[in-house]
């Protein structure tokens, strides 16, 4: 059909929202920033950790001859405050045009959404990263065993590696199977312990699909078709996935499958061929307040897309809006401050180089 004659007589309108065709899922950001701990230790967040055994116990009869020397077996892991943020810039002339009857999408809300989504995506990259320089520290650093970093939490991996290294395993021949996955989980877990065992598997869509093939084949062999369409959300308890009907309104959640009773979730932020075996009990985003800032909700307002699944309350903070000198415009900043800490790195790890089953 030729629409050229209609353009001058028929009003053209668009949907009152923008569709996000750029970003992918960010499970780790949702989980980490929805469960923050306040930064209240001063310059550093510190975690005492035992790095040696006491070997002074004796076997005896009668009164015995006990060792009276005082043994020091603890060291402090410590983390600095780091930040990540961006600015929302609002031109007043542009805003004036948007506030006429022609407005379809609120300009200010859309500008906020653009920056919010970029920050969420950027933080996802950081939380999986190495924490170089001013960057917030991520899983690549806390699950490392000396390949990428010589220290963690200001302690030497050479000196204290057994106690501060993650459990890193290269997938033999790139293969993942029940045995290799179970062995990796065992490396990160204390035998028969609930609290010191892996309670979340985070991986890529590709590796998640490989696990799904293994689990589904086993389910069919057991004539069990009730794997379910389970979901993990930023608010679900550690080690728990729930039915979609039990997910809060407006929170779609992330698809999960179980292995050994542990939810496995795919995340677009995860690096290729990696599967993280995590104990969330020891992972925390410690959030430092920024003076003259207030908490901000990061869920987009006029944008439809994957970040609608993000929690409303997170660690991000916002300044007040202020005018730009010698300019018809205003600006404000959105930032997150603190660090992503692993208080017991040996209870988390990563299976690397996974390509096939």
Image (spheres, helix red, strand yellow):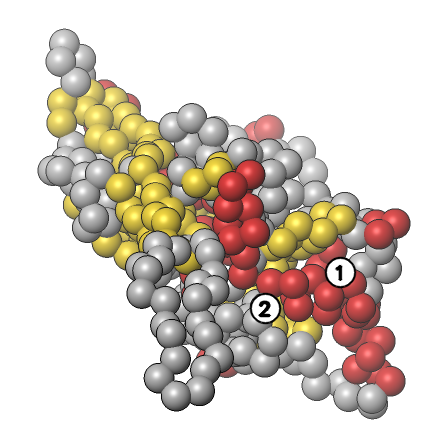
Which residue is pictured at 22% across the width and 38% down the height? 43
Image height check: is 108 above or below 260? above
Q: Nearer the viewer, mark 2 or mark 1?
A: 2
Q: Position of residue 103 (x, y in %)?
A: 31, 38
For the residue pair 71 and 190, the one nearer the viewer reads as 71
The quadrant where residue 99 appears: top left
Residue at 30%, 42% (x, y): give it: 338
Residue in the picture at 63% in, 54% down = 167
Mark linked to residue 338: none
Is residue 162 at all visible to an observer of this figure?
yes
Give the left or right position of residue 115, taking residue 255 as reference: left
Disc 2 from disc 1: Cα separation: 24 Å
Query: Is residue 187 rendered to the left or right of residue 299?
Result: right
The reply to whether the C-beta atoms of the residues labelled 2 and 1 are less than 8 Å apart is no
The label number, if any, that marks residue 209 in the structure image: 1
- Element marked by disc 1: helix
* Residue at x 51%, y 70% (from the top left corner): 196
Q: Quadrant of the C terminus?
A: bottom right
Q: Crowding near pointer 1: few (<14 within 10 Å), some, many (20+)?
A: some
Q: Which residue is mark 2?
A: 189
Residue in the foreground of this view, choosing between 269 and 116: 269
């Amino acid at each position: 059909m030729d629409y050229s004659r209609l353009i001058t007589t028929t009003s053209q309108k668009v949907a009152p929202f923008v569709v996000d065709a750029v970003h992918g899922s960010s499970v780790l950001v949702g989980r980490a920033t929805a469960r923050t701990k306040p930064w209240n230790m001063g310059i550093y967040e510190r975690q005492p950790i035992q790095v040696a055994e006491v070997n002074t116990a004796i076997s005896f009869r009668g009164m015995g001859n006990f060792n009276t020397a005082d043994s020091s077996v603890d060291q402090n892991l410590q983390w600095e405050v780091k930040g990540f943020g961006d600015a929302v810039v609002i031109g007043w002339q542009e805003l004036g045009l948007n506030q006429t009857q022609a407005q379809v999408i609120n300009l200010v809300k859309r500008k906020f959404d653009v920056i919010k989504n970029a920050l969420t995506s950027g933080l996802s990259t950081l939380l999986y990263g190495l924490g170089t320089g001013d960057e917030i520290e991520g899983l690549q650093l806390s699950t490392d065993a000396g390949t990428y970093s010589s220290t963690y939490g200001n302690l030497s991996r050479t000196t204290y590696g057994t106690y501060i290294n993650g459990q890193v395993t290269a997938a033999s021949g790139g293969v993942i199977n029940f045995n290799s996955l179970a062995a990796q989980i065992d490396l990160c877990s204390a035998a028969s312990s609930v609290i010191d065992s892996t309670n979340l598997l985070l991986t890529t869509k590709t590796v998640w699909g490989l696990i799904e093939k293994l689990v589904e084949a086993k389910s069919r062999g057991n004539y069990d078709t009730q794997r379910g369409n389970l979901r993990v959300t930023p608010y679900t308890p550690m080690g728990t996935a729930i039915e979609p009907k039990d997910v809060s309104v407006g929170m779609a959640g992330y698809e999960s499958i179980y292995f050994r009773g542990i939810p496995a979730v795919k995340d677009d932020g995860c690096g290729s061929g990696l599967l993280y075996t995590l104990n969330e009990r020891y992972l925390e985003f410690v959030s430092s307040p920024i003076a003259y800032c207030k908490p901000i909700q990061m869920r987009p307002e006029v944008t439809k897309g994957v970040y609608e699944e993000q929690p409303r309350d997170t660690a991000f903070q916002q300044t007040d809006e202020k005018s730009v000198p010698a300019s018809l415009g205003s600006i404000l900043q959105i930032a997150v401050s603190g660090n992503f800490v692993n208080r017991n790195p040996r209870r988390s790890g990563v299976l690397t180089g996974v390509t096939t089953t």
